[in-house]
Image (cartoon, rainbow, N blue to C red):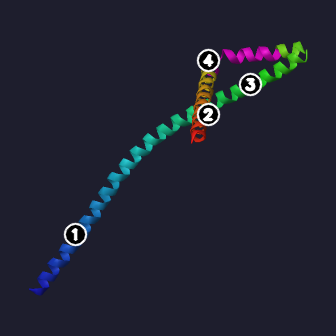
Amino acid sequence: MKKIIQVLFTLAITLIFTFNGFAKDAYIQHNLDKLAKKAEKRLRVINKELKKQEKEEKIRKKLDEVNNLYIQAEILYNQGKYKEAKALYLKLKQYVKDSDVKVAARKKKKELETLKKQKRREHRAHKRTLKKKRRK
């Protein structure tokens, strides 16, 4: 009787461990599938962001080049070197026609305007606090 109980107990424990092992494997496989799907989604998002960043970097370089061309053209114009200045102004004109550059320039202008407004507000607030301190 004891031997039968021991065998049944051993068999039960073996079945439990075996079943748990299969259950864990199935659970792990389920999680791996979820992880794979999530990884695919993340990769799509990352690829979009990388393309966006590359495009922004190209536009930023173009804007920097436009700025440098303008400065050089103005210097040459002020020095009376009109032929050299004309060539730079013609290059500038080509960049200005690019719609991406136009959009980026507008964004940059809006950012600068909002920064100026923010600084004005901070300056006014600082003045108000100074006035309040003087009154006390």
> Which residue is label 1 attached to?
16
Instruction: Estimate how packed mark 1 is, as few (under 14), some (14 to 19) or many (20 or more) residues with alpha carbons within 10 Å.
Output: few
The residue where tag 2 is placed is 123
The answer to whether mark 2 and mark 1 are in CB contact below 8 A is: no
- Comparing marks 3 and 2, which lies closer to the viewer? 2
Residues shaded magenta: 87-101
- Distance CA(mark 4)–CA(mark 2): 36 Å
Residue type for callout 2: His
Q: From this viewpoint, which residue is outermost toward the right?
A: 80
Decide: is 30 above or below 97.
Answer: below
Pointer 4: what residue? 99
* Residue 94 covered by magenta stretch: yes
Q: Nearer the viewer, mark 2 or mark 1?
A: 2
Which amino acid type is marked by label 1? Ile
Residue 18 percent across, percent down from the top left: 26, 67
Q: Position of residue 34 (x, y in %)?
A: 36, 48
Q: Which mark is residue 67?
A: 3
- As drawn, 28 above or below 93: below
3 or 4: mark nearer the eye:
3
Which secondary structure class fits the magenta region best? helix
Q: In the visual, does 58 lie left or right of 47? A: right
Q: Quadrant of residue 72?
A: top right
Query: Which marked residue is nearer to the observer: mark 4 or mark 2?
Result: 2
Give me the residue at 29% from left, 65% from top: 21
The mark found on residue 119 in the picture is none
| Disc 2/disc 1 C-alpha distance (Å) | 73 Å
**Among numbered discs 4 and 2, the one appearing first in the sequence:** 4
